[in-house]
């Protein structure tokens, strides 16, 4: 997602330019991005009061929920509105963000918004993003630039927020202090190798042969990155008076069977046991689809969900949401 579609925000880093309407170039030919007055890719304006007769879901996530690669109405959040009667979804997702920033968006903008269900969608890669203090973007001249982000640290038995407001202007990676260079999120492990095998068309084969594990931070329950993500999630969940669904969004390696999901699944079950939250992992249902169909859940080069991928996520989530809404409606 181009930074030209975004504007600075002093608490959570950035948001979409309000009332934006733009066609974004893409390998598919392009897709339409629309934002509301609050600066999020949602076809609805965010109203504090919920209309009578409607159920409302507040959705938080990153680019997989904001919908990089597809127009607004093709995203799983929007598709839920056609699958679940009398539902409206407020989509607060932002591309390139971590669960720490999603929590800050909720605290800053959505805490007082009336709703029935809070839906926290965690792309499992977020275990890396929450420990990052900068994220790399490539500008229109091909230069890598680091943008600062807010982040939490675990200190004195609680979460302490750092770097708010984040610096408005980007910095070149070479200009970072040595102690900050290790906190840059470049979008995954072994970036140079991934680019090489992807360019040669060998990425999927290489991952299958090597047993590539994209997210080793989940391997141990005491991993510092996981402990930070877990604490953010548990604090966020504890602060809720309404029902919460915690949904994990798997990377394509898990969906296509080139990596083992057992570690991340075990870690998120720990959160569910500790908080009593409804945990939804769509991966088991996705794995029941034929391999060729699962490959169609992402684009040829872009790893974000295709319209078919979003439809599969919506189909998996809809019955879970129905059950939670039914329980929330009981006196």
Image: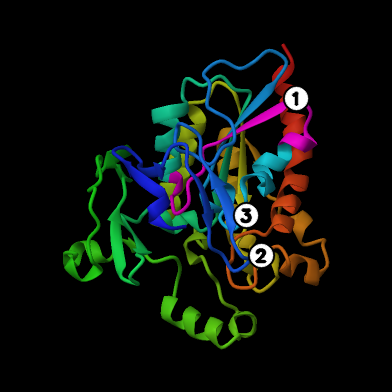
The numbered mark, 2 or 1, whose residue comes first in the sequence reads 1
Q: Distance between the residues labelled 1 and 3?
A: 24 Å
* Front in this rendered view, residue 162 or 91: 91
Q: Which residue is drawn at 49% across and 37% down?
A: 234
Quick check: is 87 in the magenta stretch? yes
Residue 174, placed above or below residue 51 = below
Q: Residues within 10 Å of mark 3 (few under 14, many from 20)?
A: many
Circles 2, 3 touching at the beta carbon (< 8 Å): no
Q: Name the residue under label 2.
A: 298
Picture coordinates of residue 270 (x, y %)? Answer: 57, 46
Secondary element under disc 2, as helix, strand or loop, is loop
Q: Residue at x 22, y 48 (%)?
A: 167
Quadrant placement of the C terminus: top right
> Which span of residues is magenta-colored?
81-99
- Locate residue 265, reporting x and y percent: 62, 55
The residue at which mark 1 appears reads as: 86
Q: What element carries label 1?
A: loop
Question: In which quadrant of the rendered view does residue 307 lie?
Answer: bottom right
Which sits in the foreground, 4 or 179? 4
Q: Distance between the residues labelled 2 and 3?
A: 11 Å
Please say if 140 is above or below 71.
below
Comparing 143 with 167, the one in front is: 143
Q: Tell which of 71 and 304 is nearer to you.
A: 71
Residues marked 2 and 1 touching at CB (< 8 Å): no
29 displayed left or right of 309: left
Residue holding disc 3:
70
């Amino acid at each position: 997602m181009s930074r030209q579609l975004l504007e600075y925000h002093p608490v959570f880093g950035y948001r979409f330019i309000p009332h934006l309407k733009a066609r974004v170039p893409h390998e598919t030919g392009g897709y339409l991005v629309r934002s509301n007055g609050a600066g999020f890719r949602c076809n609805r304006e965010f109203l504090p009061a919920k209309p009578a007769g409607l159920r409302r879901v507040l959705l938080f996530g990153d680019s997989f929920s904001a919908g990089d690669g597809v127009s607004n109405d093709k995203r799983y959040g929007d598709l839920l509105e056609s699958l679940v009667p009398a539902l409206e979804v407020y989509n607060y997702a932002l591309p390139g963000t971590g669960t720490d920033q999603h929590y800050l968006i909720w605290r800053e903008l959505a805490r007082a918004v009336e709703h029935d269900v809070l839906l926290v969608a965690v792309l499992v890669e977020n275990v890396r993003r929450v420990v990052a203090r900068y994220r790399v973007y490539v500008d229109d001249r091909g230069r890598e630039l680091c943008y600062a982000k807010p982040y939490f640290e675990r200190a004195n038995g609680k979460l302490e927020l750092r770097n708010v407001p984040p610096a408005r202007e980007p910095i070149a990676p070479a200009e970072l202090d040595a102690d900050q260079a290790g906190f840059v999120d470049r979008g995954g492990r072994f970036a140079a190798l991934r680019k090489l095998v992807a360019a040669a068309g060998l990425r999927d084969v290489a991952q299958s042969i090597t047993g590539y594990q994209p997210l080793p931070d989940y391997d141990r329950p005491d991993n510092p990155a996981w402990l930070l993500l877990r604490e953010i999630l548990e604090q966020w969940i504890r602060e809720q008076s309404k029902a919460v669904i915690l949904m994990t969004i798997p990377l394509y390696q898990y969906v296509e069977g080139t990596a083992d999901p057992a570690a991340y699944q075990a870690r998120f079950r720990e959160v569910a046991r500790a908080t009593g939250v409804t945990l939804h992992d769509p991966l088991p249902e996705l794995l029941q689809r034929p391999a060729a169909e699962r490959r169609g859940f992402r684009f040829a080069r872009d790893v974000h969900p295709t319209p078919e991928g979003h439809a599969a996520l919506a189909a998996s989530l809809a019955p879970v949401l129905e059950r939670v809404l039914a329980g929330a409606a009981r006196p």
